[in-house]
Amino acid sequence: MLIKLLNTLLMIVVALTITGVINRTRAVLAGRKGIRFFQHIYNVQLQLRKGAVYSTTTTTLFRIAPCIYLGAAVVAFLFIPIADLEPLLAFHGDIILVAYLLALSRVAIILAAMDTGSSFEGMGAAREALYGALVEPALMMAMATLALFCGYSSFADIFSTAQELDMNLTIVLLLVAYVFVVILFIEAGRVPVDDPKTHLELTMIHEVMCLDYSGVDMAMIHIAGWLKNAIFAVIAANAVSVAISFHWQFTVPLAILGAGLSIGIVESLRARNKLSRNTTYILTIVAMSALVLLTGFLLIQNIEI
Amino acid sequence: MYLYTLLAAVAVIALIFLTPVRHKVWVATGVIGLVAIAAIVLAIRSFTSVAPIVIAEFSTTFFGAEHFAIDKLSSLFLVIIAIASLATVVYSRGYVGGYLKRFAAAHISLHYTSLVMLVVAMMLVVMSSGGFSFLFSWELMTIASFLLILFEADRQDVRRAALNYLVMMHIGFMFLVAGFVMTYSVTGSANFSAIVDYFKLAQPLPLFVILFIGFGMKAGVFPMHIWLPEAHPAAPSHVSAIMSGVMIKTGVYGIMRLMQAIDQNTELLYTIGLIVLLSGIITGIWGVILAAMQNDIKRLLAYSSIENVGVILIGLGIAAVGHAAGSSLIGMCGLCGALLHTVNHSLFKSLLFFSAGNIYSKLHTTAMNQMGGLAKHMPVTAILMLLATVAICALPPLNGFVSELLIYIGMFNGVSDGHEVLYSVAGIIALSLIGGVVVLAFTKLYGVVFLGSPRSTHVAESSEVDNTRIVAMALPAALILFIGLMPQYAIRPIAVVAESISGANNSIAVNHFAPTLEAVSATGWLLIAVIIILFVLKHKAQSNRKVESGPTWGCGFTATNTRMQYTGESFSEGLESIGKPLMKDTVDGRAVDKGEIFPSPHNYRIRHKDKVDSLLGLWWVKMMHRINEYVMRLRTGRVNNYITFALAFFFVVLVLTLVGIL
């Protein structure tokens, strides 16, 4: 039980710090001093103390949606182990549940965006739905690769099996980690798919869907975003840890720095994709994860023979 | 016995025709209610007994001894049919009520007679041992549903769609006849149990393919699905509900019977599993992408039915492949997933079609782009439809997730245990793509129809429907919640049925995923609890703050109007580039040109048609037209010409006899 709580606590640490690392990395690379490390948490605290303005077009769904968005992310969050630590919840087949919980939270925010009747938010919703649909196979295949290597379909089992892996498989697992990082870019709405810092609604995806939210609702959406970042960052770090037999002490900084630095560096160095190119970009990741899975399969077959 | 059956049929028909027009629905409800209760009682009894319950035994002229009996598989389908038909007939009161003035009493009577006929025919189909009684019930089912589609027979598109349906169904029927005759010619019996012998005695694959085409035509398997998106928009909504929710599942039932017949021969099971898996993948992906592109509510729902049949076939296929490879766990997961998805789809698809019916009866259109903001005018329908939408997107904590989870677990086990990795991976890719795009399709449907602000003035005049319809919709809704939140109870009967299909003792496999389902149930409750807690906390945080309402933020633009909202067409625009190879667009009018600085009014309509439709539809329709032209020349209308034809006929016969050909 203590280990489970430790795991959850560490997950929360990861969730709270990634955004800080991203901001600091961007600031350093741009030659700025940058905002305080925990500024994003203060911002959310401020939002939690505020009132709200709701559009007259909206229905009750609009007010419940942030709770579903955050609630689904919270439940998914509880299933994620850090390396060989035990997560709070686990069962056989939970990798599918986590993927579909994230889909549920996506559906909630898409419907909320459609509820405002704003053309901009509809636009964001349509893009989010499309990218979500396309990234799903990549996510499932990356998970299937893990299941193939470790012989289980539960996060807890996959990452707790200490295995002596062949060098070839190590490389494949690093590629799986890469796929998860790119999925993190897509799901978190980061460059190169989406740019949270853009000033024009027409070019937004994730941010434009929350235009009509304020106060507590906005805070919930931000918190859910942190949790989702942590989920993908930790899975990616876990894949690396399995590959080079790290324990949780190393995985936690790896998750924070890996995700934070990669997002920060990519955002500083390159521009966002043209929106019409995003489909191709995501399909490339799908193809890549299929390739990784097939390579892994062939390697495993060879070893057994 | 024949006499009593005939008398009962005549009595029911007479009763429906003789009652006053307002009360015909109650006669139909009574009859269907009795039949449904009897079916459920018998189904439960057969569940607890070891041997199938035989209802009637008889001998037929063509195929010898046959019987109607209820085994485990039949009883599952009987329950599905009973529940869906009860909901349908109760719902029909409100829906048909709007047409009582428009149509003659006989028209309404015919409708209800066909409805009763369809329910009885479907039950006979799943009880029949095969052969003549099966074909007879199958044909009765087709004719009854044809009459039901024809309800609004004064609309030309309805007549067209109904005729199209009738032709397609008879092509499928011919395949079934051929299949049963083949079985009879080799084994001396046309029962499903004789197919087992056929598979041992003769080349099994041709028979399987022929029967698969016959059943696939009803189930809407690619490329035989093209009747579905035509028939559903034409049929009244409660008919769509029962057809899409249950009737197409009789095709799935047939495929399951076929698989039951091959459990011993692993090599054949493997081949057949591959065929089923592949057709499931193609059907599912094709159906879901076209569903996402549709802008008509019922057409979208029809394509989504095709997609769900695809999911069921993926489950069946992976079960067969896994079973053949020696993993009873994969077999059990796939089979339970497929069976449970059959149940689930019948529930949420009827609910979706009922909601579509509520909208149609208020707005008199199914074009999504004329709606918007309906949630404010029809709140109960909006809530029920939201439930069905979440369920069909296979999201936790509702029932669609449970069945897809079982199929996924089967495939992930395939991957992790090293059984048939490549096919499992193909299934995972297909199922996850389907799962992703179905979210797009249904958020589009729900968002454009119920949310936002009204796109036409009709919406403001709409109101919530009558209470009987709500009651009818509450039945599937309650079951969706039950299966979603307590899957560990729902799975028990399903596992028994799955065991009866695959033959092997699968208690190990059942034990294997029972804890999973308990965990899913617990997670579902946890999710609901977390959402409620968050909502309460949010409410508390806002309680002493200023909560205002105002217009939607227009990003600095203040002259927004409702026509500027995202439409269904624009919502799925991004998918168009991917779905292009599957569609053929028909365009009416001219779009606004980029060069027009001050655009004049334009009329522009685009419809994304199925490519299969144009591929299959064109050449043979043209050929038939040409043949028809020649034949029509003979129809002169003059008696003397016809006498000449008769004379010519006799002359030809005479000559042929003299030459010795005849």
Image (spheres, coloured by chain):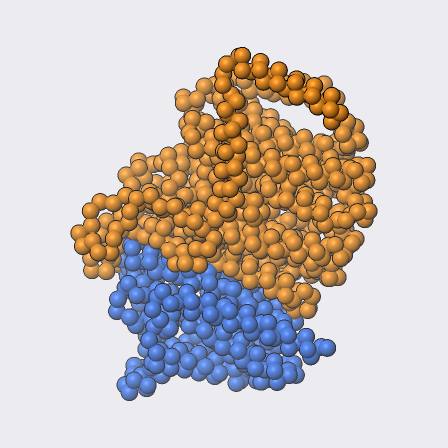
Quadrant of the rendered structure where residue B269 is? bottom right
User: Which tint was used for chain A?
Assistant: blue
Q: Residue at x 68, y 43 (%)?
A: B211
Q: Residue at x 56, y 34 (%)?
A: B167
Quadrant of the rendered structure where residue B296 is? top left
User: Which tint was used for chain B?
Assistant: orange
Q: Residue at x 41, y 76 (%)?
A: A16
Give the x, y percent position of residue B642: 56, 15
Give the x, y percent position of residue B218: 59, 40
Residue A64 visible within the image: no
Give the x, y percent position of residue B286: 51, 52
Give the x, y percent position of residue B612: 51, 47
Q: Quadrant of the C terminus of chain A?
A: bottom right
Quadrant of the rendered structure where residue A110 is? bottom left
User: Which sits in the foreground, A242 or B314?
Assistant: B314
Describe residue B62's horizontal placement relative to residue A116 as left or right: right
Residue A124 visible within the image: yes
Above or below residue B344? Residue B54 is above
Q: Residue at x 49, y 42 (%)?
A: B618
Residue located farthest toward the top when viewing the structure as drawn: B640
Q: How many marks?
A: 0
Residue located farthest toward the front when viewing the structure as drawn: B659
User: Which sits in the foreground, B619 or B161?
Assistant: B619
Residue located farthest toward the left when viewing the structure as drawn: B598
User: Which sits in the foreground, B225 or A31?
Assistant: B225
Q: In which quarter of the image is the N terminus of chain A?
A: bottom right
